Amino acid sequence: MKCRKCGGRAALELRRHNAAFCPPHFLEFFRKQVAEAVHKHRMFTREETVLVAVSGGKDSLALWDVLIEEGYQTAGLYLDLGIFEYSLESKAKCLAFAAARGQKLVIERVADAVGAPIPEVQKATRRPTCSACGLSKRYLMNRAALEHGYQVVATGHNLDDEAATLFGSVLHWQMDALPRQSPALASTHPKLVRRVKPLYRLSELETAAFAFLRGIDYIVEECPFSKGATSLAHKELLNRLEESSPGAKHNFLFGFLEKARPAFARAEAVELQECSSCGQVTTGAVCAFCKLADQVKRRMIE
Amino acid sequence: MKVILRNPRKEVEVSGQRRVKDLLTELDILPSTVLVIRGNELLTGDTVVGGDDILEVRPVISGGGGLPAPAVPVR
């Protein structure tokens, strides 16, 4: 297979684009897709400092690598979930990545904020692990950005992540989730930072290939709690569809963003207020994170 | 050739030559879900492998979360 641009030996075939690229031209393609995402959704400027949420995995480290190489001002944010060896290894990968590139890495421990590491939270609340983990991460990303003075948080969500989330939302007609699905969520409150997903145009295979070709040492092992996760089942279905119909995932996501999402936008804006317990933004009197932390505290005492 | 699979880690010996895409079909792996690595190079589906090759088949799917399907009430 030959590179579409130079005719050299291809390293990766992109069936949905009916193209293949050699390593240098694939890296160029990848960076162009990120630049297009940042530009199209006005994600951030060169004057802003971007807080990149990193997990030690391929997506977030690939994202951080691109932004550094493109000359953006960045800092990393690692949320220590306290998931045994997995967290120890993923933190070590993030620390090594940041040190090798002379970048700042902010580290926050979930246990300090919620009262227990993620495995204990699951036991204490009987809430699905990924649900408590996702809630904690969203809350702590926003809080860390505010505390450290960053206007925008970038996450490594890729095309497959976004298509799987959309699939799950449509499958259950989650009318509150559909309008929120976007590559860029603007700040709609002084205590809510902008959240962006610069990799949403790139597939999981592409972010993995980029990380490999850039020599990024990322954690290949999966979170032990992700086994059996619903989103992985949705990804598998979509991948089977993609196999017989290349471009299906792309068209599903991009068709939604361009044509359908406006129809799901709420007629009335959601009213945001500050949580009476922690002061972070919420739609109710007490935010979901404080309710979770309170539940953990009570169960730990019992 | 030796094929190293991850998550869980497993090594399999495969004899003869074949294209990467045929190898993945035999292993019941969707090509879009893995990188096929030989040394420091990525291989496309049409690359013929075999002999003394040592291949790593590295999964690319990650993530968790998503809501389980809610129970449908009986009417």
Image (spheres, rainbow, N blue to C red):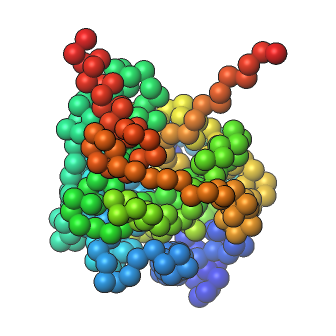
Q: Position of residue A282 (x, y in %)?
A: 41, 47
Question: Looking at the image, is A12 positioned above or below residue A205?
Answer: below
Q: Position of residue A262 (x, y in %)?
A: 69, 64
Report the residue that reaches farthest toward the top: A302
How many discs mark residues in the rendered view?
0
Can residue B69 be seen here? yes
Of residues A98 and A112, the one nearer the viewer is A112
Of residues A242 and B32, the one nearer the viewer is A242
Of residues A5 and A232, the one nearer the viewer is A232
Question: Looking at the image, is A246 positioned above or below residue B13?
Answer: below
Q: Residue at x 24, y 39 (%)?
A: A113
Report the residue that reaches farthest toward the right: B75
As drawn, is A154 to the left or to the right of A84? right
**Image quadrant in which the C terminus of chain A is located:** top left
Q: Residue at x 22, y 16 (%)?
A: A301
Of residues A284 and A23, the one nearer the viewer is A284
Q: Position of residue B27 (x, y in %)?
A: 63, 41
As drawn, is A172 to the left or to the right of B56? right
**Image quadrant in which the N terminus of chain A is located:** bottom right
Q: Position of residue A153 (x, y in %)?
A: 37, 63
Q: Residue at x 46, y 46 (%)?
A: A283
Question: Looking at the image, is A190 positioned above or below residue B17?
Answer: below
Can residue A197 be seen here? no
Residue A156 placement: quadrant: bottom left
Q: Residue at x 23, y 31 (%)?
A: A115
